[in-house]
Amino acid sequence: MTGASRGLGRALADGLARDGWQLVIDGRDPDALAAARRELPGDVVAVAGDIGDPDHRAELITTAAETGPLELLVHNAGILGPSPLPPLSAFPLDELWRLLDLTVVAPLALTQLALPFLRPRGGSIVAISSDAAVEAYPGWGGYGAAKAALDHAMRVLAVEEPAVRVWAVDPGDLRTRMHQEAFPGEDISDRPQPETVVPAFLRLLASRPASGRLRLSSLDLVTA
């Protein structure tokens, strides 16, 4: 699982560990990742690094393969982009390239490394998406475009890899640091905590529905 040091990734890692999964987790901040590792129950291996780094991706897959059968890959790592969120007319293009790299290219590169292990076991891939991938919210053009590209890449991957379940999952608005960065200075205490969607995530893995785009909070298939 990538991006597991805080927020939704941290909550999902805790839920998976308590459900009996052996985990290999990563995060860019080594101190935050180490703190998460200390607090997580069960068999958890932490590998600090940036998912955009090819050497880090290779280390993640090697570690996962050595830890146990690789059956699940969760793409949660990502960035918001500039804060406050700028309109597309003024969006810094270097920031857009970085968004696309970390949101689409890096997860695909990690997936390519993981597929030889996932195919024989009928494994699963989860890519954390957003409603910004399908809705036109002012200021969310860069982030939303990157998530939309990730969604479509996962759709095509599902067709090309029928032995593997592939889900793009929209968890809904949650009370996370990234969401706060999208609304600097605003009160986001009305958003639910990330832990609230973990049971639905575990139900998804247990029920293994057909590949597709899902709303994690309800498991309703999104056809948009």
Image (cartoon, helix red, strand yellow):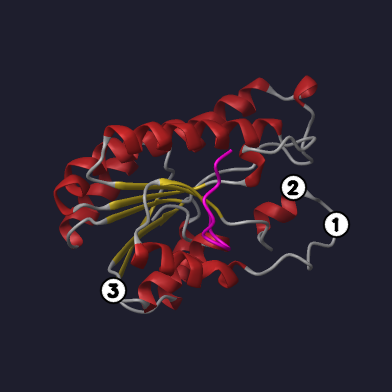
Q: Distance between the residues labelled 2 and 1?
A: 9 Å
Task: Give the residue type that dot 1 points to.
Answer: Glu
The foreground one among 182 and 58 is 182
- Horizontal and vertical percent position of residue 94: 62, 23
Asked where in the image residue 63 lies, by quadrant, the reply is: bottom left
Q: Residues within 10 Å of mark 3 (few under 14, many from 20)?
A: some
Q: Distance between the residues labelled 3 and 1?
A: 38 Å
Residue tagged 2: 182
Residue tagged 1: 186
Task: Give the residue type that dot 3 points to.
Answer: Asp
Residue 218: within the magenta? yes
Question: In percent of the image, x 25 and y 40: which residue is there?
Answer: 162
Task: Tell me the magenta residue range.
Answer: 215-224
Residue tagged 3: 43
Dot placed on the residue nearer the N-terminal end, 3 or 1: 3
Question: In percent of the image, x 80 and y 35: which residue is there?
Answer: 138
